[in-house]
Image (tube, helix red, strand yellow):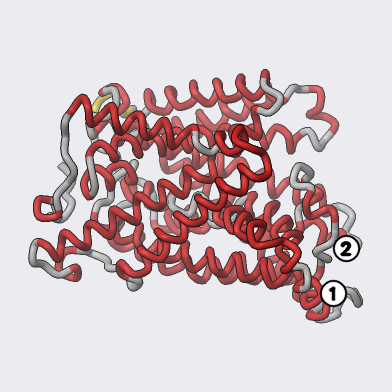
Amino acid sequence: MTNQKMERKLQARHITMIAIGGCIGTGLFMASGAVVSKAGSYGAVFTYGLIGVVIYFLMASIGELATFYPVSGSFGSYATRFIDPGLGFGIGWLYWILWILVSSVDIITLSKILHYWEFFRQFSTFYICMFFLVLLYILNLVSVKVFGEVEYWITIIKVLTVIVFLIVGAAIIFGITNNTDAGITTFIKNGEKTSTAGLLGLFGIFSTAAFSFGGTEIVAVTAGESPDPKETMPKAVKQVFWRILIFYIATMFIISSIVSADDHRLLDTNNVTASPFTIVFQNIGLGIAAVIMNIVILTSVLSAANSGMYVSSRQLFSLSLSNYGPKSFKKLNSNSTPTIALSFSVIFMILCFIFEKYNPKGYYMLLSMVGIVVMIIWMVSLISQIRLRKAIVKQGKKAEDVLPYTAKTGVIGSYIALISFGIIIILQLVSDYLTGGIIQMSYNLVCPVICLILYMSFKLVTKRKFVKLEEMDIDPYSEK
């Protein structure tokens, strides 16, 4: 095992599929039903449409950063170079914590899904978690190319599932299945449900929709192992708009046109048969729908856990390169995999499993920590892009001359996204406080408080200052 540069083994098709896969997950397969139930058809389509536009602004901003500064473990590096080294330190470790939580929650969810089949009920969720943790560890240990191939084929499964669903849904709406309860009439009827959510409830739904898009930003992390990030990153960003339009807006329209918003199954998010995809298939008499969707959701969760393990190891590698973590984390094996960083991440995932095993509310506590952390990471990346643009102007240059790719939405889109995420975070905290008190709200604040402590500690120890616009490094990135 030696210190060496990360090899760029991810191909363009891997980057494209990872970007697509980031948009399709349990948020679409499961949480979308709850949004229809709470907001009605108009509210659901409007919510996902609005959040989709904001996510497009976000991805345009991230795409600009990723092509200008294509490094593994990007978000902490962005904050260090364009905002404040202390913030880069705190956000770098926060992003690692985020993906430890995401991977752990996904693997725990996977174990719960497997208990749908009687055969797996003889094994505890803890042992199932350990089995899949070892499996994913081996996959990540072999090579980043193996990771890319696994994500590629799993994403194909997810995409085909959504396409089949859209085709079947359209057939139902146009009366091919003789289902008289489906169609525009049902969509309009479900639209009457919108007002029952209430203003606070509607904003809580925004948070759910935003969480559904979590993982979209992973494509920026892959820039550090892409052979030509200047070409692959802009393509990935340009495809975001159409993915959102097809995979989310069209899906919400079809669900709202076929399933009644009053269907109690939509709110049972702990049951795989509550997936609106499953309900649609069941409504046309496809009895094996639950089994089919169980398998699809299983692969989706496995994909998310695989991505989380990949990102967490690359984040530690990046922290080590910036001298924000132990030097051993930047040691790579012959396959260009940061083995020690990967193993360190796995240890903390095991601790999450143990926490969940001995705490009745452990699963939901881990899950509740994720949503707001994702949006904080997004906000920091937006601020990084805004400050980069300001520095370019401050130093008397033009963005087109400095940046390999410039976001069509510029900084205006970044400001809109930044304000939107800030509002959603505040309203989510208020909603949690009103529904569950200070304890439920505090779950969301654990990780941000850790980040704040890391930031303050770094500033006190190193005395490093805020990056001034006129002193910011805006030279093109080059691998040393």
Residue tagged 1:
182
Q: Residue at x 44, y 23 (%)?
A: 343
Query: Quadrant location of the N terminus?
Result: top left
Taking the image as shown, residue 269 lies to the left or right of residue 424, namely: right
**Is label 2 in a helix, a strand or a loop?**
helix
> Could you tell me residue 263's position as x and y percent?
85, 59
Answer few, some or many: residues within 10 Å of disc 2's Cα (few below 14, many 20 plus, some between 14 and 19): some
Look at label 2 and name its amino acid.
Asn
- Residue 459 vs residue 70, the one in the foreground: 459
> Could you tell me residue 278's position as x and y percent?
79, 56
Callout 2 touching callout 1 (CB < 8 Å): yes
Relative to residue 469, is residue 244 depicted above or below?
below
Q: Earlier in the sequence, mark 2 or mark 1?
A: 1
> Could you tell me residue 81's position as x and y percent?
21, 46
Residue tagged 2:
283
Residue 251 visible in the shown view:
no
- Residue 353 vs residue 158, the one in the foreground: 353
Q: How many marks?
A: 2
Relative to residue 209, is residue 439 depicted above or below?
above
Residue 36 visible in the shown view:
yes
Q: Residue at x 27, y 60 (%)?
A: 386
Taking the image as shown, residue 113 lies to the left or right of residue 342, namely: right
